Amino acid sequence: MDKLRLGINIDHVATVRNARGGDNPCPVRAAQMAKDAGADGITAHLREDRRHIKDHDIERLRHEIDLPLNLEMAMTEEMLTIALKARPHAVCIVPEKREEVTTEGGLDAVRYEKMLKPFVEKLQQNGSRVSLFIDANPEQIHAAQRIGARVIEIHTGRYCHLLGKARHDELALISESAMLGRALGLEIHAGHGLSYENVGPVAAIPEIVELNIGHFLIGEAIFTGLDEAIRAMRAAMDKARHA
């Protein structure tokens, strides 16, 4: 079985930096540490309100870190202009509301299909691989395929917050969605809310080739250091993948 890739989201290093202003802690330094710990890519969400990652962070990550950069962003003209200029390895289009604390669910690809199609085409023609961050829902997956996205990232937040049978049922939906997406020719990623405790069953789904994890690891790094936190997550993923 192919190695499961691990993308590290560094947004909340920038959150801590922005709480006091200045330059520390530096998200670019965190990205370099993530690389040294075995990360396969770096994810950064440039929000419209710039609450964590800033424009200059994207510029530095693009030029100073020798790992694929996955730019998460909303479907707006401002973000399209930035992405076309930065030309990151990948762009993940996510829903975004100013009042939310974090992304609360998947993008509604069915509702916004007509708007998303030309948006995705422009990014792909500019050299970025485009993914859509969507819920584990067959209608959303079929819409993503019609839109022309080459990748979907399945939202795992609901799975992470449920318990017992409800979590088991949500995991089954994620697995079925991954199989459907793969059958339609899409590359399958997953992420949101994953931790040491819940990552195993998701990592074991063979159709999923990449997990993107951030907030938990940045929090865990307070206690163990970022290097150890990432290596422990990699070990948990690999153990589940090859069990």
Image (spheres, rainbow, N blue to C red):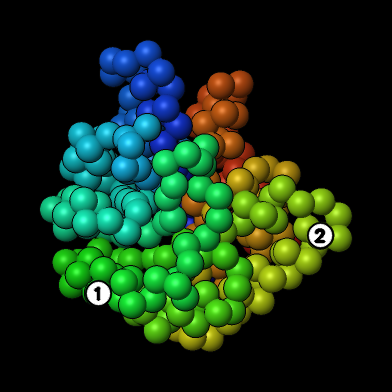
Tell me if residue 177 comes above or below residue 13 in the rendering.
below
Determine the residue positioned at 61% across, 21% down: 223
Q: Does residue 200 appear left or right of residue 179 in this picture?
A: right
Rate crowding at label 2 as few (under 14), some (14 to 19) or many (20 or more) other CA atoms within 10 Å: few
State the image coordinates of residue 77 (x, y, percent, origin top left): 21, 56
Determine the residue positioned at 72% across, 64% down: 171
Give the mark nearer the N terminus: 1 vs 2: 1
Tell me if residue 229 comes above or below residue 173 in the rendering.
above
Quadrant of the drawing holding the C terminus: bottom right
Determine the residue positioned at 38% across, 76% down: 113
State the image coordinates of residue 74 (x, y, percent, origin top left): 35, 54
Report the amino acid beneath label 2: Ala
Q: Disc 2 marks which residue?
A: 166
Report the amino acid beneath label 1: Pro
Can I make out residue 31 in this image? Answer: yes
Q: Disc 1 marks which residue?
A: 118
Q: Does residue 134 appear left or right of residue 79 in this picture?
A: right
